Image (cartoon, rainbow, N blue to C red):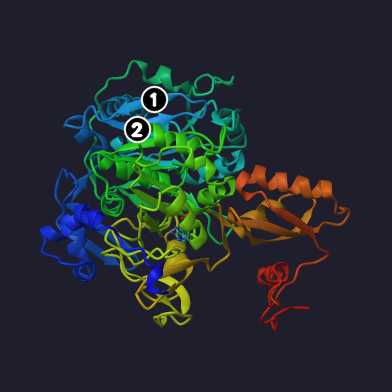
Amino acid sequence: MSADQLYPPSTELVENANITRWMRDRGIASYDALLARAADYEWYWAEMAKELDWFQPWTRTLRWNTPFAEWFLGGKINIAYNALDRHARGPRKNKVAYIFEGEPGDVQRWTYYDLWRETNRFANALKRLGIQAGDRVTLYLPMIPQLPIAMLACAKIGAVHSVIFSGFSSTALKDRVNDAEAKLLITADGSFRRGKAVPLKANTDAALAAGTPSVRHVIVVRRTGLEVSMQSGRDLWWHDLTAAESDHCESVPLDSEAVLFTLYTSGTTGKPKGIVHVHGGYAVGVHTSLKYVFDLKETDIYWCAADIGWVTGHSYIVYAPLMLGATSVMYEGAPDWPEPDRWWRIIAREGVTILYTSPTAIRMHMKFGESWSRAHDLSTLRLLGSVGEPINPEAWRWYHAHVGGGRCPIMDTWWQTETGAFMVSPLPVTPLKPGSATRPLPGIAVDVVDQSGQRSPDGEGGFAVIRQPWPSMLRTLYKDPDRYRQTYWSRWPNLYLTGDAAMRDADGYLWFRGRADEVLNVAGHRLGTSEVESALVAHPAVAEAACIGVPHDVKGDVPKVYVTLKAGHQPSPQLADELKQWVANEIGPIARPEAIEFRDRLPKTRSGKIMRRLLKAETLGKDVGDVSTLED
Ligand code: PRX
């Protein structure tokens, strides 16, 4: 990497950065000195934890019983208290927390006081329905203010939320409700997407009809006005339920290790993993990362254009910005609706200063062309962010030039649902290299190792691992500690396996290459190849299926599947379409295969494992490599 490709931060940015003040207060003179000082990671995280409000201070920073971590032991905290209560009672009471824009163009401004009162009313309603600390509540809601409100209300009373992305199908919803054994399901009549109302309550009804024995009540938000069927005794309207509730509800002091939420993510088997996060450490991790990486200031208008249904929205639309008392934009609909400049209009109207999005979205805007962003005043932007997949240098440069006006640094943040918060990312003091997430953040030990778990030499690719615990790490997999140990900690002793391939260069910068396992990254969302395969073999015509990822110029990867049919079924274009739709119905539209190829048989190892690697090499026209284990 030659020096002319380095993008050093401006002196002004460095001088005024939150991290610079933090370093100055502690006599730390440089970025390298900061990383060295934070090698004492218990010290570093304890310093960061002091920035939050604790009902009772912790007595021990970390207990590390590999691979099970507990942070801030003995401490009592509630993340909702930090996100709402302390602001509603302080100088930020009338500051806008969310500028919400619905897809039809309706705008709502929620102050901290508004948000706090509605959360309190809803928390009281939850209690009235018998929801107690530790109970699981499934949220199947679009990007509307009631989603963060319901999450915060759960957190207030110690209930555990499980948000299911509203683009998931009723089958995916049912499976996740049943895994969580949720007592309560919260949804909306529908949501607006590309000018249409998506029938969420009808999807929910289909999930319930398929069998969700734990669910006692369904709360429905009226959003679209779609007609819905309400089952008496079970289904309740949000507005009826909260109308008479009190505006006051105290956040309960919780053990710092109390579970805050579970969030399902794809793994290498057909069954999604319930990632478990807790109040204390997660609060510290997301608060620290947003404050110092995106350098959030009192006057910023911050916009994370993700969906709350994924971890990015949990951490960086809901919990971190609210804990920081920020003003955030929240947008309901499609980025190109009704025209490709929807985002640029919002940025210009609200004077957005920080934009955080994904390479897929950037590449989509690149395709529309820069005339759309050029037509709007984006001069208020000062920082940009990227997440979800490796950003190709071309997209990086386009984003830098045509959104950031050449003046905004891009924070390429590498992290995962499991890590809760950013792990590898620049700080405002870090010189940037387009395409690299730069270096591990202070207190974080991400590294690259070879097949045997030894540190890879600089410049050589390998597997990304994490060498030590961090506060916002997942604590376990829901109801499955063995799978937790097996999935992340069994390949090499004491190394957390991220599943990503990466390379460390001579400057210590990390270059993430994508997944090194049977997981695809479709438009920044994880999809297990085996999930697609299990959906397909559930179709009456399908005998066997193999799914691979093929590169796509906007979405990163897209699924392609190879299918063998059962006797009596013939390949046809109609059947291919039917199978694509089947997968979309079983999992959700993001899983819809881009292509289906019928085969008489699939290549297998002698032990009967389908060799996806071979299909992939063939499809991409690459060398098939070692085929000595091939059966035939
Ligand atoms: O492969 C990496 C990719 O997304 C995976 C995590 O996916 P998920 O848990 O759904 O969380 C996405 C949002 C945090 C990682 O294993 N990934 C995420 N961010 C980056 C990335 N790959 C390269 N660069 C990134 N900045």
- Give the amino acid type for the residue marked by disc 2 in the picture: Tyr
Q: Is residue 47 above or below residue 306?
A: below
Tell me the number on the disc at residue 272. Answer: none
Numbered disc 1: secondary structure: strand
Tell me the number on the disc at residue 108. Answer: 1
Residue 134 is at least partly visible in this image: no
Q: Earlier in the sequence, mark 1 or mark 2?
A: 2
Q: Is residue 494 left or right of residue 27?
A: right
Q: Are marks 1 and 2 in contact (CB under 8 Å)?
A: yes
Q: Is residue 536 left or right of residue 44?
A: right
> Which of 570 and 534 lies nearest the eye of the viewer?
570
| Residue 28 coordinates in the image, percent (x, y) | 14, 65
Residue at 35% x, 61% y is: 425
Q: Residues within 10 Å of mark 1 (few under 14, many from 20)?
A: few
Q: Quadrant of the N terminus?
A: bottom left
> Which of 496 and 195 lies nearest the eye of the viewer?
195
| Residue 129 coordinates in the image, percent (x, y) | 38, 26
Residue at 45% x, 82% y is: 452
Q: Residues within 10 Å of mark 2 (few under 14, many from 20)?
A: many
Which of the 4 image quadrants contains residue 20? Answer: bottom left
Residue at 85% x, 54% y is: 571
Residue 299 is at least partly visible in this image: yes
Q: Quadrant of the C terminus?
A: bottom right
Residue at 23% x, 38% y is: 81
Which of the 4 image quadrants contains residue 504? Answer: bottom left
Q: Is residue 226 above or below residue 337?
A: above
- Give the amino acid type for the residue marked by disc 1 in the picture: Gln
Numbered disc 2: secondary structure: strand
| Residue 398 coordinates in the image, percent (x, y) | 49, 54
Q: Which residue is mark 2?
A: 98
Q: Is residue 189 left or right of residue 447?
A: right
